[in-house]
Image: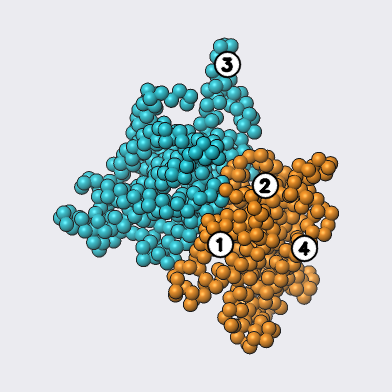
Amino acid sequence: MDAIVLQILNGLDKGGAYALIALGLTLIFGTLGVVNFAHGALFMLGAFCSVALQKLLTLSMKVKDPSVTFFDAYKQIPYLEIWLGDTGKAIIDYAVPLSILVAIPVMLLIGLAMERGLIRHFYKRSHAEQILVTFGLAIVLQEIVKHFFGANPVPVPAPATVAGSADVGALLGLGSSVIYPWWRLIYLGFSLVVIAIVFAFLQFTTFGMVVRAGMADREAVGLLGINIQRRFTIVFGIAAIVAGLAGVMYTPILPPDYHIGMDFLVLSFVVVVVGGMGSLPGAVTAGFLLGILQSFASMTEVKSLLPGIDQIIIYLVAVVILLVRPRGLLGRKGVMEG
Amino acid sequence: MQDNTPRNDLILFACFSIAVLAMPLWTAPFGADYPDLLQKFAIYGIFAIGFNILFGLTGYLSFGHAAFLGVGSYTAVWAFKLLTMNVLPAVLFGVIFAGIFAAAIGFLSLRRTGIYFSILTLAFAQMSYNLAYSVLTPLTNGETGLQLRGTDPRLLDSLLGVATPDGLPSPNLFGFELLGYPSFYFCAVMLIIAFYLALRITRSPFGTMLRAIKSNQNRLSYTGVNTRPYAMAAFVISGMYAGLAGSLLAVTDPLAGAERMQWTASGEVVLMTILGGAGTMLGPILGAGIIKYFENIFSAFNDATLHSIFGFLPHWLSDPLVAVLGLFVGDGWQLTLGALFMVIVIFLPGGLMEGATRLIQLTRRKRPDGGSSEDAAGSRRAFHAGE
């Protein structure tokens, strides 16, 4: 029982990342009809927002270390700490949550620029060409990041207060054997909140209503005199923010390197396909489901039974789904079937 | 390309063969006349020709073609290890195994079209890649890659009493060692054969059927044609081409690693085909050559070479220039690749062959009026027409 709870929890945080990326992919596909292979790169850019902020905050000055008296020793002290004392220390400690504030405007800008500058010209082109051009863009973004931050993973620590592990077993009344890192729990909660915000935004605001109407019948909405194009551009920006936030918060779990986006992109596309192309609830459900499946497949018991299953389980599920139920788990009939 | 008479095809084939065989001569001015690079031109040319049969002719965008390349490589190295250092069995088995592998994947993937097909092939390729790295380590030797060893059995060789040299043996063709230029000529002959077969396939009724699948599969089904066997055949053929390319990679360097199967490798062959011109005969080979050439040249550049190139400029001008260009060369070669990818898809979806055709058309139209000397203006116009 404990093992099962632990595996489900293990799957949920990764599933949260899959769900967030897949949500953005689906939003873009549903509104603009564009297959965005650069979405993983947006996730990666988000992650590097937090890396960049952390580097910026910890810009340091070489100061003589007074505690060493035998010889001249120097140590690096961040400017923030010198200027603000303990407050500065706290700010540095909370670099990752603070990056959320940075990432939102940055990702929105990147998203809007991408849509206006590139994607806009590809509405009427074939899916193959959309895939190819966004694939090229992904490589370009990736290489630029590699140039500035190097090819190695950059560790970004979580705030010290939540660096430890939570005794989830005790919280749930299951005994004390379920220990789980705080930050992963936070990530899970964070992804749920972001998903809830996106859904609420689409469901309860006028803007969201117009977007949903546009997804259903773009032409009719246009004929009503609504500039649906501009709203769709904003939706692209929102999708970019969601992917970016998923990346920001994921940095303490997995130190980001420049191709982290590609690794997640392939899986997220699989998630979108399993959930059903164009179905938002499908993308979220499939994201969490596949995350949990993957974590169960990585259990040693399962691995000894079916060696290598942890490496391929997601693809295997996708293949089966595509062959048996091509519209995906929650996809509407007729959307992209064939 | 409009008049595809057998005579024109023969001329095309003859010119192509001569150009390939004379490659060491005419690549010399570009500094590309060494066997290592020429082999790559030929091998990736074969890979791209095969990919073009599936993508350019039939219209299926596969994102997992590198898997077949990898299977071809592994099979060839195993043939070297178990049977003989003669290259013919290695190539043969590489092609056959890649074909079988392609048949299995194609059987499942071809149930879907469009992006679903792309994602399915991508999923299968990633699966193969992950497995090659983890569970299949006894077969693939994991991260180290599959290598030859002095202690390999080489049953046929020992049966026929071929003397084993001290140290590692090198691939041979009936005792004739394939190293350097002989190895390139072996690849070149394979490329010519591959090109001839592709030409025959394209011009055959079967090729016409593949083009019909590309232009409108639904209409074809409504007229009562079952398109699946044709698409399947195209997929397997294209997989076998990839297997041939993979086994030739193993012939030129008997080592197979899983990174050959990664999806970036699949992306590269897509780019080669698109850059040259999908659906054309020569385009993919041209694209493969250009990419491999620039990969070789650009990745060898570094900031110091750039500085010496722009040394004639004043410092305030050359330094920022070098800083910007330095992004694109050396380790940043991938950036050039990505940017090239975007530029081609955006401005010239038909690839270089389309650009060339447009140029020719423009000059032809010009000629009766008398003025045909504005090549630059023509190319600029062709560019804008592509937008």
Quadrant of the image for the C terminus of chain B?
Answer: top right
Q: Are circles 4 and 2 on residues that touch, CB within 8 Å? A: no
| Res A273 quadrant in image | bottom right
| Res B40 quadrant in image | top left
Q: Circle 1 — which element?
A: loop
Residue beneath label 1, please?
A152
Q: Amino acid at mark 1?
A: Asn
Colour in which the image shows chain B: cyan
Residue at the bottom extreme, as displayed: A175
Residue beneath label 2, please?
A33
Give the number of the mark in front: 3 or 2. 2
3D distance between C-alphas at marks 2 and 1? 35 Å
Q: Amino acid at mark 2?
A: Gly
Whichever of callouts 1 and 4 sits on the residue coming sooner in the sequence is 1
Whichever of callouts 2 and 1 sits on the residue coming sooner in the sequence is 2
Q: Are circles 3 and 4 on residues that touch, CB within 8 Å? A: no
Give the number of the mark in front: 1 or 4. 4
**Chain ID, mark 3:** B
Q: Are circles 1 and 4 on residues that touch, CB within 8 Å? A: no
The chain that appears orange in the image is A
User: Can residue B356 be seen in the rendering of this structure?
Assistant: yes
Residue beneath label 4, please?
A197
| 3 and 2 marks on the same chain | no
- In the rendered structure, the answer to whether residue B343 lies left or right of residue B226 reads right
Q: Circle 3 — which element?
A: helix
Number of the label disc, if any, that sits on residue B366: 3
